[in-house]
């Protein structure tokens, strides 16, 4: 098994397992199994899904839930701007590529040294997470409170650790480190809501990298 495949599978498993938490939380928020699965199958953006059910769980309105989910997911549009010129999907593959454009598929794509490996990493990671996430969502929704706290199992940290592992080797040179520091600063600024913080942090990555690392 080559390195790209190993990376894609490990990220898919680590991220997908966290879908158990979403399934359980969605069920606890009052959504039925069909609604929960449709969110994972069609929305397929973990942060957006958690934001939506979080609003419902606290008694928020549908409009508030939609706005929160949109703010969390809009960063994927920024990924698509770059990925489209490199992946170059055609026909129905364009719709599939759009559905699979998430943090992790973008990160695995960006971590590769050749275009062929980058494309392979994008597709393998996207499809792998989609399958794992939806199976885990189903399990979480059905098992509900019986599985206990996902934090106790370490599932909340698994996806973040896998993502950090992909990004860490890319932080070489003053400019990448400065951009990373700015992103952390924006994300941790308390005056921003969670959705706005993620959007602004994504915008930081668009700072032109004109100087060489």
Image: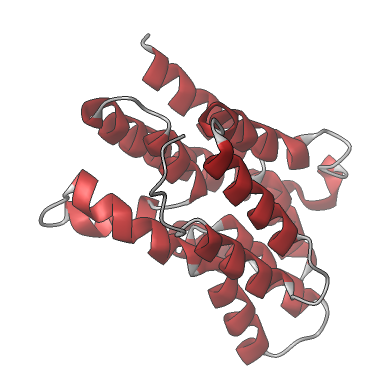
Q: Nearer the viewer, residue 161 or 92?
A: 161
74, above or below 76, in the image: below
147, above or below 72, in the image: above
Q: Nearer the viewer, residue 108 or 26?
A: 108
At which x and y percent is residue 2?
36, 11
Q: Residue at x 57, y 75 (%)?
A: 71
At which x and y percent is residue 37?
54, 59
At which x and y percent is residue 176?
54, 42
Q: Name which quarter of the figure residue 165 lies in.
A: top right
Q: Is residue 109 left or right of residue 94?
A: right
In the rendered picture of this protein, how many numbered marks are placed on residues? 0
Q: Residue at x 31, y 61 (%)?
A: 81
Q: Is residue 191 left or right of residue 124?
A: right
Q: Residue at x 73, y 49 (%)?
A: 21
Looking at this view, name the residue that lies furthest to the front: 211
Q: Residue at x 25, y 60 (%)?
A: 95
At which x and y percent is residue 35?
57, 69
Q: Is residue 198 left or right of residue 101?
A: right
């Amino acid at each position: 098994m080559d390195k790209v495949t190993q990376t894609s599978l490990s990220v898919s498993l680590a991220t997908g397992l966290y879908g158990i938490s979403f399934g359980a939380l969605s069920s606890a928020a009052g959504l039925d199994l069909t609604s929960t699965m449709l969110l994972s199958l069609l929305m397929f953006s973990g942060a957006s899904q958690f934001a939506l059910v979080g609003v419902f769980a606290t008694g928020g309105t549908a409009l508030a839930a939609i706005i929160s989910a949109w703010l969390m997911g809009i960063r994927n549009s920024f990924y698509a701007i770059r990925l489209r010129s490199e992946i170059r999907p055609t026909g129905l593959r364009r719709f599939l590529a759009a559905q699979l454009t998430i943090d992790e598929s973008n990160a695995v794509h960006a971590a590769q040294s050749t275009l062929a490996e980058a494309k392979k990493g994008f597709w393998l990671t996207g499809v792998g997470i989609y399958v794992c996430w939806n199976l885990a969502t189903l399990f979480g929704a059905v098992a509900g409170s019986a599985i206990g706290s996902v934090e106790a199992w370490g599932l909340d940290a698994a996806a973040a650790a896998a993502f950090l592992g992909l990004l860490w080797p890319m932080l070489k040179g003053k400019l990448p480190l400065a951009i990373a520091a700015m992103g952390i600063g924006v994300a941790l600024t308390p005056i921003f809501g969670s959705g706005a913080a993620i959007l602004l942090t994504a915008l930081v990555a668009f700072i032109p990298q004109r100087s060489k690392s």
